[in-house]
Amino acid sequence: MWSIIQSAGWPIWPLIFTSVLTLAIIFERLWALREERVWPENLLEETLSTTQKVRSVEQCTEMAEQSLLGLVLAGGLACRHRDRVHLREALEVAGRKAESALEKNLSVLSMIVTIAPLMGLLGTVVGMIEVFGSQSSIGADPTALAHGISTALYNTAFGLIIAIPAAIAHRYFRINTQDILGKLEDAGRALLEKIVINPQRALPSTPPPGVSAARPPASLGSSLNRPAL
């Protein structure tokens, strides 16, 4: 392996760094997108069946940190006492956070797909320069000629070896991300409808100690339509 690196010349080093970065991103995405980190089993069903349960800010925060589905659901549960418009906005904000987490490092992977062949092409050009530089009036230096050809071919091959798996991985993660986002959107819509249809269950049955019972806040639409006294 070391002999190949020596034959490829200095242009191979940026390609080696790029290959390490590509592998790091692929393994990081595989770890981050595992099922228990994205969509824990039975979490959606349990949340929909207990929307009336009183949850503290700490409980919602813990749910949001455990999984992306928990992030979306916690965003809705934290605003379950508010009207439909505010609840939808809270779910949309949580959905954007989940989307950002899903697409993390994908832009870097896309950039690698583009620049890796160009970096290989740069090595090819450097190798061809060495080939022509070995020519002289008394003939070509066989050692310099062989080194120039090796530099050109090895760098071209390394650039393609990096770009092809990176392109496959980027496409796979992109499709997987869109599929997960669709499922998270469906989960948020289900939570929204559950809370809106059963608003009385979203309110705590008993007020916290020291706080007197209060009527549920009226929605914006009902307050506007109320006749003047």
Image (cartoon, rainbow, N blue to C red):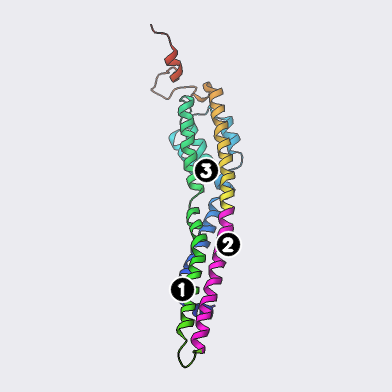
* Residue at 47% over, 22% down: 206
Q: Earlier in the sequence, mark 1 or mark 2?
A: 1
Three-letter amino acid code of the residue under disc 2: Pro
| Magenta highlight on residue 69 | no
Nearest to viewer (mark 1 / mark 2): 1
Q: Could you give the CA–CA distance between mark 1 and mark 3, rounded to whole angstroms?
A: 41 Å
Nearest to viewer (mark 2 / mark 3): 2
Q: Nearer the viewer, residue 35 or 178?
A: 178
Q: Nearer the viewer, residue 212 or 5?
A: 5
Mark 1: secondary structure: loop
Three-letter amino acid code of the residue under disc 3: Leu
| Magenta highlight on residue 166 | yes
Q: Is residue 131 visible?
A: yes
Instruction: From this view, report whether residue 71 is shown above or below residue 200.
Output: below
Query: Is most of the magenta stretch helix, strand or loop?
Result: helix
**Rendered location of residue 78, percent (x, y):** 46, 32
* Residue at 50% over, 88% down: 143
Q: Which residue is mark 1?
A: 11
Q: Nearer the viewer, residue 196 or 150?
A: 150
**Rendered location of residue 54, percent (x, y):** 49, 29
Three-letter amino acid code of the residue under disc 1: Pro
Report the residue that reaches farthest toward the front.
137
Mark 2: secondary structure: helix
What is the quadrant of the N terminus in the image? bottom right
Nearest to viewer (mark 1 / mark 3): 1
Q: Could you give the CA–CA distance between mark 2 and mark 3, rounded to whole angstroms?
A: 27 Å
Q: Which mark is residue 68?
A: 3
Q: Which mark is residue 165?
A: 2
**Rendered location of residue 66, percent (x, y):** 51, 44
Q: Which residues are magenta?
A: 142-171
